[in-house]
Amino acid sequence: MSGRTMMERFVVGKEEKRRRWLNAGWGLLFSAAMVIAVSVGHEQDPERYSSLLWWSVVWLLGAANLGNLLFLLRYLRVIDDHCIELVPGKLRFLSAGKWTELELEQVSALRLFRRRGRLRHIQLLLKNRRGIRLEGYQDMDRLAQCLQDALPGKLMS
């Protein structure tokens, strides 16, 4: 190689998209179970489980699931055009056709969050006391290693 520093690019993985769909499906299944439970209760004891309760549960859970589905579809549409690039001194974000950049000197700490031994998300703590959470990217371990290399001494456990 010609002494040029490499750019690393990361995109949201298929596993993350699948996980989001599964979460929406579990929410829908849980909602259906609640509606069925209230329906059975209404059949057994109409005074205790009034039709007002049944309709309230149906409307509330229907609206919640519809909202969840709309957020999921928006998320899936946006991440098709999303990636992050780690270039010398900067972390670049492409979203909705626009690039934004974070100067790595603004990062005061790097935190890695693992669950069951697997890296779940990375948090960049900024000097202005804000944070950026990176999750769902393909090869999160490589992303973490690249960030650790670019931010020596800033890893917090």
Image: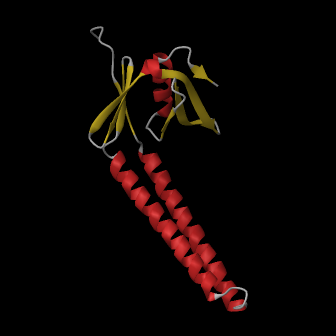
Depicted 75 relative to depicted 25: above or below:
above
Q: Quadrant of residue 55?
A: bottom right
Q: How many marks?
A: 0
Depicted 146 relative to depicted 71: above or below:
above
Q: From the image, which quarter does the C terminus lie in?
A: top right
Residue drawn at x 56%, y 69% as measured from the top left: 29
Q: From the image, which quarter does the N terminus lie in?
A: top left
Depicted 65 relative to depicted 12: above or below:
below
Residue drawn at x 40%, y 51% as measured from the top left: 75
Q: Give the residue at the far top of this rendering.
A: 3
Q: Is residue 41 left or right of residue 6?
A: right
- The spot of residue 89 in percent (x, y) is 38, 17
Q: Quadrant of residue 26?
A: bottom right
Q: Give the residue at the far front of this rendering.
A: 128
Residue drawn at x 40%, y 41% as measured from the top left: 12
Way the structure is coloured:
secondary structure
Residue drawn at x 43%, y 57% as measured from the top left: 71
Q: Quadrant of residue 84?
A: top left
- The spot of residue 145 in percent (x, y) is 49, 23
Depicted 115 relative to depicted 51: above or below:
above
- The spot of residue 82 in percent (x, y) is 34, 41
Q: Which is nearer the eye, 29 or 99?
A: 99
Q: Is residue 35 left or right of residue 134?
A: right
